[in-house]
Amino acid sequence: MRGNIYDTYHGRNRFATFLKVLIVLLLLLLAAGLAALFFLEPYLVYSADGVRLELPPFFQGQEDTPVTSTQPPVVVSTAQPTATPERQEEFRGITLEGTALYDGTAQAQSQQAGANAVIFDMKADDGTLAYISQQEIAQTAGVCAEDPAINAAIQLVNSGELYTVARVSCFRDNTIPRWNNDWAVRGSGGNWRDEGNSRWLSVGNPEARAYVVGICQELAGLGFDEILLDNCGYPVQGRVERISTGEDYDPEQLTGPVEQFFQELQTALADYPEVKVSVVTTPQMLSGAGDTSGLTLTLLEEYSVRVLAAADESGTLPTPEQLSVVPVVEAPGGAEEQWAVLTPPVEF
């Protein structure tokens, strides 16, 4: 007889059920622990005293405290560009020897004379230059300064606080006409000479004008604040009636070439708008009588910031209202007046 199939069943195993529940609880605790560790890990601080938990102020019932930087603020200092000297209403200029361009005495000499401007003869009446020009004819004729470091020295002086003026004897030039007669003011016997036995370039010759304009442009590039044009037209002294007339010299049309020179110079200095132009003229010109230079009061007013002129034999110096006139004197004047000394050296 087959036995009862239920004889071997002894009821549910309670121990196995307990183990299952325990395993589930342990798994839940492990998961919770891992989650807590992941969340709290940024707030665990390890030190010599062990590990401690530093919760953010929010969980501690405190308000956030702004973080105050202990680092000093960073101050960015921007170098200010050197200001170009403004036009000086009162001009007191002293001419210095070329050695002052590199011996460091320019400032002291200027202060001792009571000047607010220093003048350097950068193109002398004999045609020599106090700097090194890049123009081919200047190098060929040997009129450039010999010191290879002179241009750098000039730039250094001009980068300081001094108001620097470059005098240019434009067309009175005793050297270049010997190298190129076509550029010269001519007479019946060759190059015309003035009362000082000096030759002249002709302002009526385009190439001669270009040479002088090029010099002024180079001087502006070296940092001079002002270009002082002397002898910037046709000759006014000497036997001017012996000058050969022609394309470059028409006694009836002297102003045209001079005006063209000023226009060409203005164009050449367009890249240096801070550079001023002044002119040396005669008392006859300022009186309105005119002379044989080709200059006019209108040209002076239009193209120069000031004019320099010596008084005539009677001590008179006309001062037209439309012009700033600076008297040319032999020695420094007072602190409350305008003056210019154009003859170096100056003895103190």
Image (spheres, helix red, strand yellow):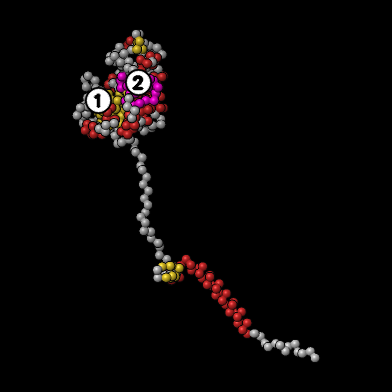
Please name the amino acid that badge 2 sits on.
Gly
125 is within the stretch colored magenta = yes
For numbered disc 1, what is the local secondary structure?
loop
Total numbered badges shown on the rendered structure? 2
Q: Quadrant of residue 202?
A: top left
Quadrant the N terminus occupies: bottom right
Q: Residues within 10 Å of mark 2 (few under 14, many from 20)?
A: some
Quadrant the C terminus occupies: top left
In this view, the residue farthest toward the left is: 348
Numbered label attached to residue 344: 1
Residue at position x 32%, y 27% from top? 147
In this view, the residue farthest toward the front is: 1
For numbered disc 2, what is the local secondary structure?
loop
Q: Quadrant of residue 6?
A: bottom right
Residue at position x 35%, y 26% from top? 132
105 is within the stretch colored magenta = no
Q: Residues within 10 Å of mark 1 (few under 14, many from 20)?
A: some
Numbered label attached to residue 153: none
Residue of label 2: 142
Whether the residues at callouts 1 and 2 have beta carbons within 8 Å, the answer is no
Q: Position of residue 245 (x, y in %)?
A: 38, 11
- Residues drawn in magenta: 124-145
Q: Position of residue 305 (x, y in %)?
A: 33, 29
Quick check: 251 above or below 45? above
Left or right side of 102 for 52: right
Instruction: Choose mark 1 or mark 2, whichever is in front.
Output: 2
Residue 324 visible within the image: no
Quick check: 283 above or below 26? above
In this view, the residue farthest toward the bottom is: 1
Q: Foreground: 4 or 53?
A: 4
Q: Position of residue 325 (x, y in %)?
A: 28, 27
Residue at position x 24%, y 20% from top? 312
